Amino acid sequence: MKLFLKASCIFAVSIFYSCKDQALAVAKIEGEEIQVTDTISSNAELDQFIAPYAEHINKEMSTTLAYAPKSLSKSDAKYNTAIGNMEADAVMEMLTPIFVSRMNDSLDVVLLNYGGIRASINKGDVTTKTAYNIMPFENEAVVVKLSGKTMQELFQYLAKNQTAHPLAGAQLILNADGSIQKSLIQKKPIDTNLTYYVATNDYLQLGGDHMDFLAKTDTVINMNYKLRNLFIDYFKKKDTIAPVRDQRFIKLEK
């Protein structure tokens, strides 16, 4: 059932018979909830008008981009998942040449959020609709420059939350008690004297999912690349989507 809000605004107009401009202000807003059900007949003329556009959109959304030999879900594991690894690796692979060309420097880490994976990828054809399902938001890819100290905060956040946030370019190994045993960036320990480039999205960069450390920067580079479009381009490039779990984020057993 879809609910539409019918709103009417009553404007109070103050008219001055002088050189002053008219001052307009909203005096009152009224709303009414109208329930739309199948008891309301469709508009044949409107349906006919919409039909060619709907057909075009459906054709575009059903375009096959790649193939997934097995289903991928973010609930497959606790610390890193195949679909999460795929998302982070896709961002690293697709953004790196753009970033190098623009900044003459390299990306170090990719960090996205577990909650941003909005759907599974089913076994079979991976279509444009698949990309819209896993990323229905209009999030843009951004790159931030973080200090080595702030990167330590990033790892501490991951250790505390123990959630399979998509991660690439880094490795985090936790002891059985949840403490950090090892944290690496590009296979090297964090150097607090260095700065690092981290790719993420604009929502997280502003502190979404409590990732406040991503806002601790004076360098934010908008890559002008929606994550959804990035995934579509990645699917086209890869043909077969078969990511796996690995050792990038794990917790040791007792």
Image (cartoon, grey):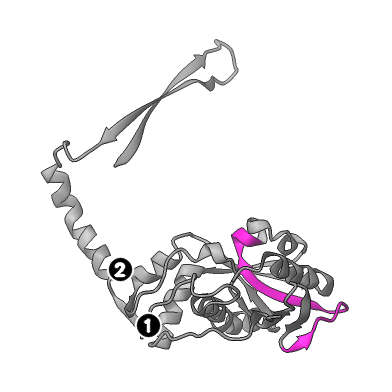
Q: Tell me if 3 is positioned left or right of 214 in this view.
A: left
Q: Tell me if 35 is positioned left or right of 250 in this view.
A: left
* Quadrant location, the N terminus: top left
Could you say whether the residue bearing mark 2 is in a helix, strand or loop? helix
N-terminal of the pair, mark 1 or mark 2, is: 2
Q: Which residues are magenta?
A: 187-204
Q: Does the segment drawn in magenta span residue 107?
A: no
Residue at image point 68% right, 57% down: 210
Q: Which residue is mark 1?
A: 70
Q: Is residue 93 above or below residue 138?
A: below
Could you say whether the residue bearing mark 1 is in a helix, strand or loop? loop
Residue at image point 27% right, 71% down: 62
* Quadrant location, the C terminus: bottom right
Q: Position of residue 244 (x, y in %)?
A: 50, 85
Q: Which residue is mark 2?
A: 61
Residue at image point 36% right, 86% down: 69
Q: Is residue 40 above or below residue 139?
A: above
Q: Is residue 52 above or below residue 129?
A: above
Quarter occupied by residue 104: bottom right
Task: Please tell me whether mark 1 or mark 2 is closer to you in this view.
Answer: 1
**Residue 243 has which mark?**
none
- Asked if the residues shown at circle 1 and circle 2 are in contact, with their CB atoms under 8 angstroms apart, the answer is no
Q: Does the segment drawn in magenta span residue 188?
A: yes
Residue farthest along the left direction in this orientation: 44
Q: CA distance from mark 1 to mark 2?
A: 21 Å
Q: Residues within 10 Å of mark 2 (few under 14, many from 20)?
A: some
The amino acid beneath tag 1 is Lys
Residue farthest along the right direction in this orientation: 193
